[in-house]
Amino acid sequence: MPWSLNRCSGVVPRAKYTTAVFRVDPPLPENFEVLWSDSRCNPDHSVCTVPIQAFRPKKMTATVLDLDNSTFFRVSATAFFEDDR
């Protein structure tokens, strides 16, 4: 899979699973909440780690809410890795 914007890819020898780290940058002030597309992620944190499986892309979307002025923005990224097969 070629490199592109909002994608992270790599090779992890002999691994069926690894951990992907998704992050909203810069760190958010306290008046923000993040609604992650994966329910295992905490809305109080701007970082989410999830297990991913070799050869299976994991797309994560984050809807970032500004609780002070009722606005939001949405970002997304995809993580992917291969083992050494």
Image: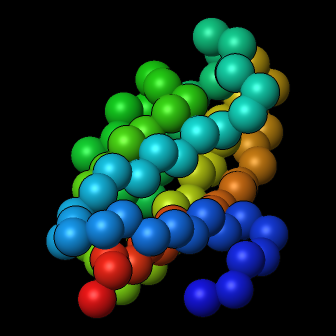
Between residues 5 and 74, which one lies in front from this camera angle? 5
From the viewer's perspective, is 1 left or right of 84? right
From the viewer's perspective, is 40 left or right of 56? left
From the viewer's perspective, is 67 left or right of 54? right
Q: Quadrant of residue 28?
A: top right
Query: What percent of the width, then of the height, locates residue 18?
Result: 29, 57
Q: Quadrant of residue 41?
A: top left
Query: What percent of the width, then of the height, locates residue 49?
Result: 37, 43
Q: Residue at x 77, y 76 (%)?
A: 4
Query: What percent of the width, then of the height, locates residue 62?
Result: 58, 51
Q: Dividing the image into 4 quarters, which one contains the N terminus?
A: bottom right
Between residues 11 and 50, which one lies in front from this camera angle? 11
Is 49 rendered above or below residue 69? Answer: below
Colour setting:
rainbow
Between residues 12 and 24, which one lies in front from this camera angle? 12
Is 67 rendered above or below residue 41? Answer: above
Is 50 rendered above or below residue 11? Answer: above
Q: Residue at x 28, y 89 (%)?
A: 85
Total numbered labels: 0
- Whether residue 31 appears in this view of the structure is yes
- Whether residue 39 appears in this view of the structure is no
Q: Residue at x 80, y 69 (%)?
A: 5
